[in-house]
Amino acid sequence: MTEAKSIAGDGTRPLALVTGVGRTVGIGAGVARALAASGWDVAFTHWTPYDRRMAWGEEPGAADAIAGELAARGARSAAVEADLADPEAPARVFEEVERRLGKGVTALVMCHCESVDSGLLDTTVESFDRHFAVNARATWLLIREYGRRFTGAHGTGRVVALTSDHTVGNLPYGASKGALDRITLAAAHELAHLGVTANVVNPGPLDTGWMSEELRETVRERTPLGRLGTPRDAARLVDFLCSPHGQWVNGQLLTSNGGLT
């Protein structure tokens, strides 16, 4: 019996909802694969227009490819395209996931983000507001929807959010991620009556195709283990937190970056 089947308590596969799974090389996809391999069914969100306007660009067919990988690991899945800047989107996502997969969400893992480089002097009000809408407000609304709908056994529920401590030259991203931290950690107390744990993971800079070679080398030099972090590194910690073994870890902001200084 896998860890996830143990957490379900009845031998069935519990359901995880992972947000921000738009690219096969991203953190969200890595988390989805790890959870599927551990016995979870996995619903995931993506938002193609975001990838399209970023430097890495759109990855056609990514959602179907990821769904295929999850199926190969024994998981049922559902991909939902959603702009999480829309305050109505979180409720619609949960509705669609429950309708398509026929059960409630046991683990909510938030890997989505808005991330556009800009600093104190050149950030626009529109960009600032969108960062907070996606990174902070959507996090609150997703957790709120999760808490309102959760009916799992006491001690099985999980909320995990991916964060960052980057601020210089990335002001709206860093500031909104700081808000995400506080919102998620509040859930460890406010959802305690449901037996839900809530934690934040800071994975450090991971190589998902956005780094220049100069930045890759800098990160390698500053990391005691002498290599770049990968989505799989972040996924292993998330997988642990969602397992029965992670049940006593609660209300924590965990750094998992190979010792990067």
Image: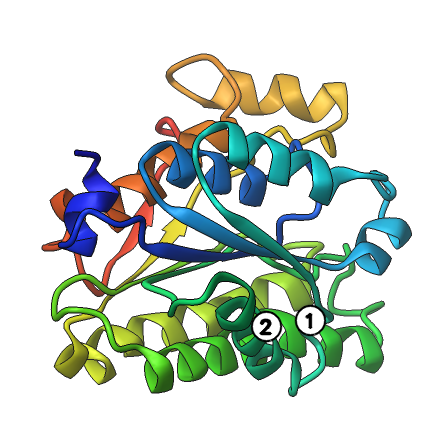
**Label disc, if present, on residue 170 of the rendered structure:** none
Q: Position of residue 197 (x, y in %)?
A: 22, 65
Query: Badge 1: few (under 14), some or many (20 or more) residues near its Cα, within 10 Å?
Result: many
Query: In the drawing, does residue 34 fall left or right of residue 253?
Result: right
Residue drawn at (42%, 29%), measured in percent from left and top? 233
Q: Amino acid at mark 2?
A: Glu
Residue 66 % position (x, y): 63, 37
Q: Amino acid at mark 1?
A: His
| 171 and 164: which is toward the camera | 164
Quarter occupied by the N terminus: top left
Mark closer to the chain start, 1 or 2: 2
**Image location (x, y in percent) of residue 36:** 42, 38
Q: Secondary structure at mark 2?
A: helix
Q: Residue at x 37, y 26 (%)?
A: 258
Task: From this view, report whether residue 71 is shown above or below residue 54.
Answer: above
- Position of residue 172 in the picture relative to residue 144 (left or right): right
Q: Position of residue 221 (x, y in %)?
A: 52, 16
Q: Nearer the viewer, residue 89 or 235?
A: 89
Q: Secondary structure at mark 1?
A: helix
Is residue 249 at all visible to an observer of this figure? yes
Residue visible at 80% across and 73% down in the picture: 127
* Residue located at (22% from left, 45% from top): 5
How are the colours assigned in the image? rainbow
- Residue under pointer 2: 96
Q: Which residue is mark 1?
A: 131
Question: Looking at the image, is 237 positioned above or below residue 110?
Answer: above
